[in-house]
Image (cartoon, helix red, strand yellow):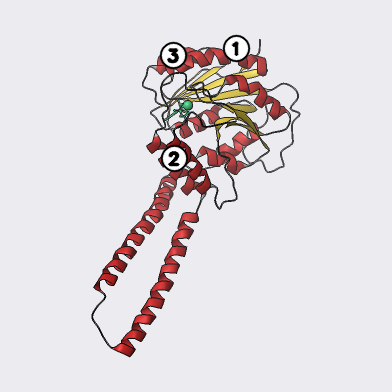
Amino acid sequence: MRSATPQALAPAIRDDRSGAVSLSCVIPCFNEASNLEILLPALRALLPTCANLWEVVLVDDGSTDGSDALLHRWGDEPGFRVIELSRNFGKEAAITAGLRVAMGEVVVLMDADLQHPPGMIPEMLAHWRAGSDVVYAVRENRRDESIAKRVGTAAFYRLLNSFERVKIPAGAGDFRLLDRQAVDALLALPERNRFMKGLYAWIGFTTAAVPYEPPPRAHGKSHYGLWKLARLSFDGITAFNSWPLRVVGAVGTACALVGFGYGGYIILDYMIDGNRVSGWTTIVVTLLFFFGLQMVFLGIIGEYLGRIFEEVKARPLFVVKSDRGRGLSARR
Ligand code: UDP
Ligand code: MG
């Protein structure tokens, strides 16, 4: 296995990728018992055909559906490792927990709900062997999603990618293969707000995209409703963009200039025409407008302040309750 030291100072030496490979499959699970019953046997059959050493790292993100009994059983199987978090910390934290313990030189991240077909792993691995460090699956279409979600997603990527240097590809999710170097780079990022789509893009490396058509969820329903998605989008935009603050500054400056201009006009008017008490409507409307604007601006600044607060508290991203299984198993 290659060294796992993050941010090595010496330039990384490209290993020969044609030979033996060790592969970890990291899966965050939140109430996925019935899906895992299908997915795990499939992975146990598939992974030994792709890699010489393989492991499946399951992160139980505080499930309450009785997954723990099933996961404990799988934790005793060779090649499986089960990390149980002390409560539900969210998918992003669960992924980070899995990445921390994954030992493979190649790590595949996937969902537990069979929307990320395991059958694509060999194709991803082929891209890795050809030199890509990050291979991500891109959804071909969003026909399965509601119009509201599609429009919202399009607007979100527009906003997200509007000004920044790091472009986040639309349609690329968490289903991806990461080279050890990329995993170490991700783990070296210290922030608590782990908007993974942004972090994947931030680390860079040679990437390749593999198109796929996501099948519907095998069992259960998505954990991400419209409200949760909106919050996640807000996290993403504030974590990767400072343009909202710049817009606030620009609008403020423009208003101030207009204000000065109008002030000058009123003074001139007073000097020429004398004092006429009128314009009550103008005053009230102007005051209301600027009070409103200030509240919005304070809200935007508050969002950033809140995020700074989260970061300076420096709490751990998750708490591990139990850790079963030894992971990496050799092909027999
Ligand atoms: N997940 C998780 N913690 C959460 C929510 C989701 O670990 O708080 C896992 C979930 O078990 C699944 C993956 O994240 O393996 C994707 O979740 P889901 O299918 O609900 O999201 P979608 O496919 O709708 O984006
Ligand atoms: Mg899903």
Q: Which residue in the structure is indicated by mark 2? A: 232
x, y percentage for residue 53? 65, 18
Q: Is residue 130 left or right of residue 28?
A: right
Q: Is residue 313 above or below residue 39?
A: below
Query: Closest to the observer: 306 or 1?
Result: 306
Q: Is residue 321 above or below residue 301?
A: above
Q: Which residue in the structure is indicated by mark 1? A: 45
Q: Earlier in the sequence, mark 2 or mark 3?
A: 3
Spatial CA span between label 1 and label 2 = 35 Å
The three-letter code of the residue at mark 2 reads Leu
Quarter of the picture holding the C terminus = top right
- For the image, the number of numbered tags is 3
Depth check, mark 1 against mark 2: the one in front is 2
Q: Earlier in the sequence, mark 1 or mark 3?
A: 1
The three-letter code of the residue at mark 3 reads Leu
Q: Earlier in the sequence, mark 1 or mark 2?
A: 1
- Report which quarter residue 255 is drawn in: bottom left
Q: Residue at x 39, y 36 (%)?
A: 226
Q: Is residue 284 left or right of residue 306?
A: left
x, y percentage for residue 145? 46, 31
x, y percentage for residue 217? 47, 22
Query: Closest to the observer: 58 or 282?
Result: 282
Quarter of the picture holding the N terminus = top right
Q: Which residue in the structure is indicated by mark 3? A: 70
Query: Closest to the observer: 203 or 234?
Result: 234
